[in-house]
């Protein structure tokens, strides 16, 4: 339910997403890993019962939005989200994505063609068991030469009332400008963390200037900065986990990243917070960032990051972290 102006003082922790009338919690539930294994960017086997319990735990603790995508588990993540929401009265906002359909063999494709996007939307509505998507996002601007057709299609779906707002994910400033000339970009979803800061140069300032809401993903760098990712755990990641092939999880970057995580633990101990909560709070310090997407596979993982909902770093601690990163 969208809060009215009279309700907002009681919900002061909520943040307005860009120029929309969506007021969201500083962190949202990310469901990438809930798609399970068996697809190119999977996280290995995942128990659906644990997934549902994790979502419900996050909602019980006040999170009011869920981010998913059609591609996660080739539709399975959206189905799990729908199962988790059955019978609940506190229905959260649902954000999902298009542009990565798949063939009969489960191979991910790339398309921003109008017909493909319309089919993806109808499939997502069916899997999620909803009539309208709160925020519908282009997952990747690929192929680039189809961007205008794809964004125009999202604008048409918005006019038809199929989606409330439209967003971009992984867009450059140039691509945001191209899209914005056809229909307003309501939100951007870029990667952002202590070890992935390139969006600070142009993208975040542009969004702040244009009033585009920003929901960042992977603020804990896919678990590396959570405080629970030790070297032995990295080495034991299942074969179907995409992180096994990520350079951030391999040397020489792995040692550097775990060193940062250890330092975040020290910062967190001062406040009774986890390293992950410090990592999330660091992304939320940026004035252009509306909120952060945080994934969880179990209720215990939710408990490990939920404190980031209201935890904020001091200016001195932000400076301290910056100095550490440069040391």
Image (cartoon, rainbow, N blue to C red):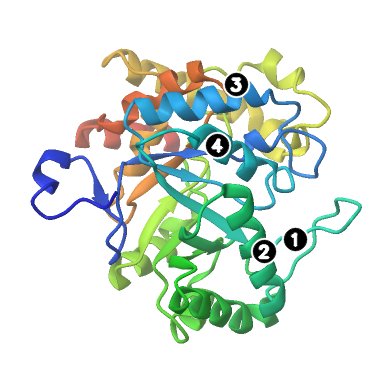
Instruction: Say which residue label 3 marks.
Output: 50
- How far separated are the C-alphas under marks 4 and 3? 22 Å
Residue 280 percent location from the top left of the image: 39, 35
Point out the frontmost of discs 1 and 4. 1
Q: Residue at x 49, y 19 (%)?
A: 299
Is 272 located above or below residue 39 in the figure? Answer: above
Quick one: label 1, few (<14), some, or many (20+) residues within 10 Å? many
Q: Are marks 2 and 1 in contact (CB under 8 Å)?
A: yes
Residue 215 percent location from the top left of the image: 41, 52
Instruction: Say which residue label 1 marks.
Output: 101
Left or right? Give the position of 137 relative to 252. left
Instruction: Say which residue label 4 marks.
Output: 221
Compare marks 4 and 2 and give the one earlier in the sequence. 2
Where is the C terminus found, in terms of image quarters? top left
Point out the frontmost of discs 4 and 3. 3
> Can residue 276 be seen in this snapshot?
no
Instruction: Say which residue label 2 marks.
Output: 120
């Amino acid at each position: 339910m969208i809060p009215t102006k009279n309700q907002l003082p009681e919900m002061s922790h909520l943040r307005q997403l860009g120029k929309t009338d969506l007021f969201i919690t500083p962190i949202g539930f990310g469901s990438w890993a809930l798609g399970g294994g068996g697809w190119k960017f999977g996280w290995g086997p995942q128990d659906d019962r644990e997934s549902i319990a994790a979502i419900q735990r996050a909602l019980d603790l006040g999170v009011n939005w869920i981010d998913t995508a059609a591609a996660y588990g080739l539709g399975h993540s959206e189905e799990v989200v729908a199962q988790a929401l059955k019978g609940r009265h506190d229905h959260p906002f649902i954000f999902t994505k298009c542009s990565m359909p798949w063939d009969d063999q489960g191979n991910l494709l790339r398309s921003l063609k109008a017909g493909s996007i319309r089919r993806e939307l109808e499939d997502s509505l069916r899997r999620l068991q909803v009539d309208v998507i709160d925020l519908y996002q282009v997952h990747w601007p690929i192929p680039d030469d189809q961007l205008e057709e794809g964004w125009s299609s999202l604008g048409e779906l918005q006019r038809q009332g199929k989606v409330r707002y439209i967003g971009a994910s992984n867009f450059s400033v140039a691509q945001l400008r191209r899209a914005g000339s056809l229909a307003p970009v309501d939100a951007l979803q870029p990667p952002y963390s202590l070890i992935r800061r390139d969006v600070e140069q142009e993208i975040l300032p542009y969004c702040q200037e244009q009033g585009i809401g920003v929901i960042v993903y992977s603020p804990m760098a896919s678990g590396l900065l959570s405080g629970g990712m030790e070297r032995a755990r990295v080495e034991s990641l299942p074969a179907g986990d995409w992180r096994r092939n990520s350079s951030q999880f391999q040397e020489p970057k792995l040692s550097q990243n775990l060193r940062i995580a250890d330092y975040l633990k020290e910062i967190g101990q001062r406040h009774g917070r986890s390293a992950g909560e410090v990592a999330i709070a660091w992304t939320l310090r940026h004035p252009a960032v509306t909120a952060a997407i945080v994934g969880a596979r179990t209720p215990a993982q939710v408990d490990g990051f939920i404190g980031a909902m209201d935890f904020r770093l001091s200016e001195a601690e932000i400076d301290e972290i910056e100095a550490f990163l440069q040391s």
